[in-house]
Amino acid sequence: MIETDEIVLTEAAIREKVKELAGLIARDYAGKDLVLIGILKGALVFLADLIRNIPFPVTVDFVHASSYGMGTESMRAIRIKKEIETDIGGRHVLLVDCIIDTGETLDCLLKRYAERKPASLRSVVLLDKRSRRTVSVPLDYTGYVIPDKFVVGYGIDCGEQYRNLPYIATVKTGT
Ligand code: IMP
Ligand code: MG
C-alpha cells in the first residue's frame, strides 16, 4: 500500500519556480529557434506549464526514456521507447525533465542528441536530487534541489499513479 506522506512543494511554490525558469529561458533564447524535448512521462506536466510561460513560438517534441520500473527501485538501464521526430541539427535544443536523480537518463540523452549537431544543447529540470548523482551532468536551469526522498506528483509517478497530483509529495512505501 502506498500513501502520500508530506507535501514537499505546494502548487504555489511550483508555479512560482516554473515562471522563474521560463523567464530565464525566454531571456536566453529570445529570437532563437528553440526546440524543447520533454522526457516522458515525467516531464508531461512541467513542460506543459513551462511552454505556456514562454512568450514566443517554440517547437515541442518528446522522447520516452525510462530508467525506473513500476516501483521505487532504479533498474539502472535507459530504454528509448519513443524517439523524437524533429530534426534538431543546427537548432537550439533544451531537454526538459521534471526530476533528475542519478543523472543517467539525462546524461545518456545529452550524448545521444549531441551527435545530431544541434546549435546548442542544454537541460532544465524542476527537481534536482543532487545527493543521488552517479554521473556528472551539466544542468543549465534547475528549479529546486530536494533531499533523497521518493516523491510523486506534478507528472512524477510511483507505479504509474499520482502523476495528476498538482503538488509534489513524498510517498510511504512498504506493506
Ligand atoms: P535518473 O536517470 O536516475 O536521473 O532518473 C531520472 C528519472 O527517474 C526521472 O525522470 C523519473 O522518472 C525517475 N525518478 C527519479 N526520482 C524519482 C522519484 O523520487 N519519484 C519518482 N520517479 C523518480
Ligand atoms: Mg516512473
Image: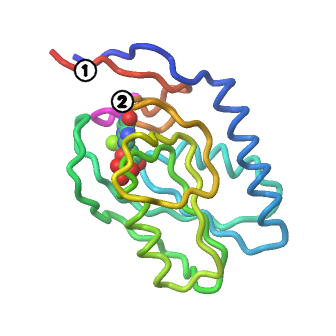
Left or right of 37 in this view: 109: left
In the image, what residue occupies the spot 37% across and 67% down?
108
- The x, y position of residue 92, in whole percent, is 66, 74
- Per the image, the residue denoted by label 1 is 173
Q: Which residue is mark 2?
A: 150
Contact between marks 1 and 2 (CB within 8 A): the answer is yes
Magenta residue check for 8? no
- The residue at the point 57 percent across, 24 percent down is 9
Name the element at disc 1: loop
Instruction: Depth check: give the residue in front, 145 or 122.
Output: 145
| Residue 146 vs residue 8, the one in the foreground | 146
Span highlighted in magenta in the image = 157-162
Quarter of the picture holding the N terminus: top left
Crowd tier of the residue under label 2, counting other residues whose Cα lies within 10 Å: few below 14, some 14–19, many 20 or above: some
Residue type at numbered disc 2: Phe
Residue 161 among magenta residues: yes
Q: Position of residue 110 (x, y in %)?
A: 47, 69
